[in-house]
Every structure is written in C-alpha cells, then in structure tokens.
Amino acid sequence: MINTSETTGPLIRICGLAKTFGCQTVLDGVNLDVNQGEIMVIMGGSGCGKSTLLRHLIGSMLPDQGHVELFGKRTCDLNKKQLTETKKKFGILFQSGALINSLTVGNNVALPLREHTALDESTISIIVKIKLELVGLREHADKLPAQISGGMKKRAGLARAIALDPQILFYDEPSAGLDPVTSAQIDQLIIDLTRKLHVTSVVVTHEMDSAFTIADRICMLDKGKVLKIGTRREFEDLRDSDINNVTNETELLIRQFLRGDADGPITQRIVNSDYEEDLLAVNEDSKLCWCK
C-alpha cells in the first residue's frame, strides 16, 4: 500500500530545537525542514548531537526549547493517544536492528501488525511475506536472529519498520558494523524503499560513502549546531574543492570531515584546547559541572 500525506509544506519541521544535559549543550537551536519523499542525511562527528536529534524526532526525548512538527502538528501538543497514532505513521531502523531474539524473523515483522491492527493471522502472514520479500529475506522467515548475519538483521529490522506502511522511515546508523558490500546493499535498499513506497527517509550516519550514495540533501551538525544544509552535489563540490579556494572557517571544517583529512580545523580545535583547564576544571563553568 502506498501512503500519501495530506500535509502541505515540509513533512518534518524542526524549529529552534535545544537540549542540555547538565552543563553540556547537545542541541543548540537546530532548524531543519524535511520534504515529503526525500532522503535527508544527518551527519556529523561523534558527539555532535545527531543521535539526540533523532530521539527528539521519534518522540523518545523532549526538548528544553523549540519543537518538532510531524505531519504539520507539534509533537509536544499531542496527547498520549494522538502521539501513539502519529508513531504508527513512521518506522525506525535501529542501529543494531533491535530484533527480539526469542522470536523468528517473521514473528518480529508481524509484531507491530499484531499489536496495532485487528488483522487476522492469515492476512498478517501475507503482509509479513510481502515485507520480507521487499528486503530479500522471505526465505529466512523461520530463522531466529541468532541464525542470521548482521546485515540480514538490519534488513529484518527494516522489514519490521515498514510493516505498518509508514510515511516516514528513520534510520540510525544503518551501515554501522557492516562490511562494504553489505553496506552498499543496505544503501541501495534505502533508496529502493524510499522510491517504491513513496516514503520520506531521515538517515543518521557518519559513513561518508553511504551518505553520498543515498542523500538527496544533507544536514551537517557540529557541537549541536547546524553547520550546513544543502544538496548532495553541494557537499560533493565542497569535498572536492581545492583547499586554497576555501577561506570560510566553517567550510574548511566541513571539508575536513567529508574528506577525513588528518589536518584541519577539527584537529586544530583539539590541539588548542587547554588540557590543564579541562583536567582540573578550573574555570567557573567547569566548577559548576563538577559540582553537579
């Protein structure tokens, strides 16, 4: 079944999102629109805030400031029943696949159908086969998670994520821990499902090869802030540009990250940090952190 949204404008809207844990600001005024039918890749280094941003998008975390809109409605304004109904409209592929080890692959995919629909078992069985066929696992429906590979677990998790015909798919590091060939297969699966099912996909990753394969647009985070939002081509041009032609500090930082260069603003920032101050927490902010 193909889903269509009646929402006009962006299907997902993030407005001024901010989140702080103790003295650490993890998200700092993030603004981002995701359009219907596109693949938006959210990238950045470890600790940049991309996983925290994903948790806000799926409703497992509430912001300190700002808000998230899904399908034209602020999630913070929804009551419990409305939020549950909204969550049925999106699927999530967790980094590990998050399969239930005691259930077969087929029963893992059937789980949301049994929990959230009144369909009879014969209908559920047909839907499960269809979803597993879409990810190339129909022949492995009766196997337990322990009997399949890491890449197959990701695909099984994806089959479960699309069980309820969602309008949005969220991916948390879908290529993490996979060999290059399997990673390429997952990338192609993301593209195929986005196009075939007419869904909107949001992919959190730091894998450059994957990002430049699947993205329609890319959002790069650093220290909880949005550094750049642009098309894949714009990021490719910046990655491939001559360093002598890049004078903007932000673009130099992005370029270093995209290329994986050892030298640049990112590494210089680490070198320039005051080790003694950090170790002894002698400034006022650090004293407050340690006291907490």
Image: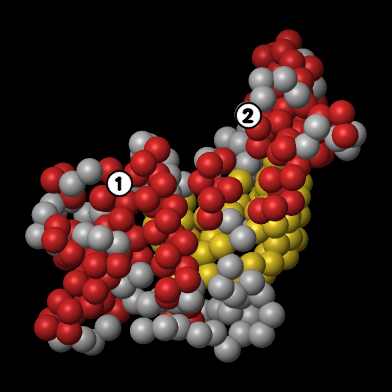
Q: Which residue is drawn at 21% across and 60% down?
A: 137
- Of the pair 154 and 241, the residue shown nearer to us: 241
Q: Is residue 104 above or below residue 288?
A: below
Between disc 1 and disc 2, whose residue precedes? 1
**x then y, percent, for residue 216:** 61, 60
**x then y, percent, for residue 106:** 17, 64
Q: Name the residue under label 2.
A: 260
Locate the C terminus and report the quarter of the image it occupies: top right
Q: Mark 2: which secondary structure? A: loop
Q: In this view, does 148 lie above or below 6?
A: above
Amino acid found under the numbered disc labelled 2: Gly
- Of the pair 24 and 205, the residue shown nearer to us: 205
**x then y, percent, for residue 90:** 45, 71
Q: Mark 1 points at which residue?
A: 151
Amino acid found under the numbered disc labelled 1: Gly
Q: Which residue is drawn at 19% across and 72% down?
A: 129
